[in-house]
Image: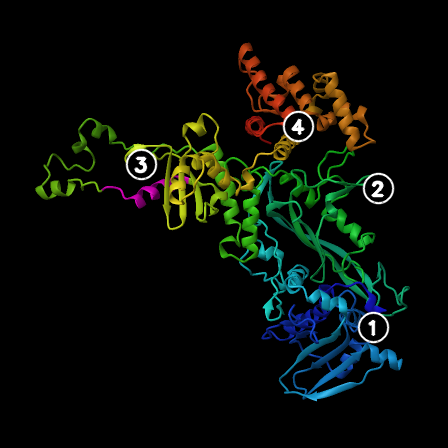
Amino acid sequence: MIAEVDLQLHQCLGELIDNALDELVEASAEDQTLEPRIDISLPTASNAARSPQISVSDNGRGMSPEQLQEALSAGTSGKQRFGSLGLFGMGFNIATARLGTLTEVRTGRQGDDQWVIATIDLPAMQRKSTYQVPLRYEDKASEEHGTLVTVSKLREDMVSRLKSKRAIKETMGHLGRIYTYMLRDAKGGHSGAELMGGANQRVYVNKRAVRPHIPCIWDPSRSVTYKGGEVQAATEIDVQLTNAYACMNCGRWYNSAHEKCIECESTLIEERERQIRGWLGIQRYADKSDFGLTFLRHGRAITYQDKSLFHWETPDGEFELEYPIELGMGRIVGEIHLDHAPVNVRKTSFDNSSQEWRFMVEKVRGLEPLRPKRLIGSENTSPMSRFFNAYRENKPGLRYLIPGNGTMATHEAAKLWGVKFRNEDPEYLTDTRWYQAAADHDRIKNGPPPESPAASDDEDWLDGEGLSHLGKGAEGNTPASDDERKADKPEPIKPETEEQRFARYAAAATLLSDTDREVRIGNAQPVLRVYVTSGVELTKDGRKQPYAIRIVGGEIEVFVDRSATLIARYGWSPMNVALMCAARQLQSVYSVDGPIDQLVTSILEQFPDRRVDSASVRARADSLLNDMRERLADLAPRDAKTYWSALSGESCRAAEANAISIAPDVDWVGAVQSGEFARYLSAQGIHDLVINGPELVMDGTLFRTTYKAFSESTRADQVARVGALLADLRRMVAESSSLQPLELSRLLLTADLLDAEIASS
């Protein structure tokens, strides 16, 4: 019957690994010189059908005959329920029986001269109607120690699984995620290593190391500004709980001391410490599925990338998804250790109805909405809510720590860098590449910071008047000697080499971060890098031009002047200008036939972040609208009646309908009186405020646009300008799916202009 428990291959191995890790952690603490390791041997796809067997061994302290007898007794465990990863007893028997029908356990301690061996043959035990097996002994060297579990006569479904060429790779991937904490090195070179921690254990499958799935987070030293304070990109969770009493046999907890467990009648009840610990962080890239929290028990991941805490439980018991907001892509990750909370027998989930789980939810996520969009009175001040609000948008730049290329967010490029992080590329272990891309985006979009004027020399005027000989360096009117005149003679100017010229360009340039990669051009695959220059003149044969290109050794470098007419006057992106200008030379060098636009299109198609589609336009519009609503929610309560009266009847009804769709039991009359209605305004509603009450939303309140200081005619121009931007925002929200790419590009430019008008928080 226990063999019918639904466990996958990696879950069966996990039960055996748990027991080995428990032993190795204790053995390492006892012997600092021990180099702990677990070795797993799996049949390959080519030999899975020929008498296959699976083995798991460790180099721990091993067991005595008495310890082995207790360990293998089904229904008992020599381990404490809440003090270990594994439970030998039932967990061991379920896992081995699920793998195959014949199991051998070989164990021995250092100093002993014999291995202790037990063979569990399930069919033979059934035939004999006995569950007793004898112990055997074999000679060994006294210095040998450890435990080896070998399972043979594998079950058909396991053999079928192992015949797949992907079986071993996928199993190692599962184990890397389940044991990421146990396998990690807290002193590793990746950002956040010390915060995330780790046990630095080693597991090998067929002599290949299982690599932990390390979260790719920003360094805790990075931060963004939210409500006047700094919110670090990664933070520790440490909630100390009062001690309680746990039954070491069945795991039931008690708030007070008990002599006997009411569940299993065991008298093994001990006072135990309880703690909610771990961390929350922001991932360096956004993804539609690769995010969420991992919940661990004694170092083993029970649930991986869990997203349940991103739902808000409404007062009527319904669950509503609150995160992610934009494009369905999230970045919040973390690990929460719940060593005191109960899990199911397969170790695949915590008991979400338990008091321990619900208390964790309250402390980590909070009981209120993550952002104050529901009219329930209290604000969520939990760690997750603060992360949610500070990093809620996927807007490129340092404001939200999102890599960009000066035009848009480079989500796909950031994810490709994440792959290099997983492959342990040393250049991508820290967040430097991502941070530089976010900073470069701001630099390309906003231009370089103005240079401080050089300090003037008090004697410059003497030079200008031809009187430099009267300066501080002059000693009277003594004429210069012949040697001095020769020394002052300028060196002849040497022609600048191409290497020097491009080095000069590079010193005044910013790399478009998503272009530092291989691209397919004809039959070649060179590395393409595009730079935007500022303050340096690009030339060819002595003539100024808006671009410069160099192709050397399989690498293409294109420099584009940010003041080029197509960029400064017509709004082209630097990438498009670079490709159009360089296309003919690329065609010639790489022998590509066909029209220019076909070549440019084939290159752009390799940069998915640069596509313009209705989904990205709608997401950008929703982001701006939510941002303005949040700011208005702080402004409207100052004079709710005046703000409400500036709205048209249509906008009032739309706000009420929006509020009801989100919170059906909303007190709308109270929301109107308090100013909370502002959280539900449509783009048309904000447009009404600009047209009917510009003094309410300009001059640094909602918009940075100056209003009161101008004349009446200029005021009207300011209102018309912002109103036109908001009219486009209405189109972005309502009609973007039916618009052509050229119009979508224009609307994205409008979004940038509107974003620049919104006052900073």
| Disc 3 crowd, CA 10 A, few/some/many (<14, 14-19, 20+) | few
Q: Residue furthest front?
A: 593
Q: CA distance from mark 2 to mark 3?
A: 70 Å
Quarter of the view holding residue 354? bottom right
Marking on residue 27: none
Q: In the rendered structure, which disc, 2 or 3, sits on the residue that comes first in sequence? A: 2
Q: Can you identify the residue that label 1 sits on? A: 76
Q: Can you identify the residue that label 4 sits on? A: 733
| Disc 1 crowd, CA 10 A, few/some/many (<14, 14-19, 20+) | some
Element carrying mark 2 = loop
- Amino acid identity at mark 4: Val
- Amino acid identity at mark 2: Gly
Q: In the rendered structure, which disc, 1 or 4, sits on the residue that comes first in sequence? A: 1
Q: CA distance from mark 1 to mark 3?
A: 82 Å
Element carrying mark 3 = strand
Magenta region: which residues? 495-509
| Disc 4 crowd, CA 10 A, few/some/many (<14, 14-19, 20+) | some
Question: Above or below — where is 243 with respect to 267?
Answer: above
Q: Can you identify the residue that label 3 sits on? A: 540
Q: Quadrant of the C terminus?
A: top right
- Amino acid identity at mark 1: Thr
* Image marks 1 and 4: residues in contact by CB distance under 8 Å: no
- Amino acid identity at mark 3: Lys
Q: Nearer the viewer, residue 656 or 729?
A: 729
* Image marks 1 and 3: residues in contact by CB distance under 8 Å: no
Q: Can you identify the residue that label 2 sits on? A: 317
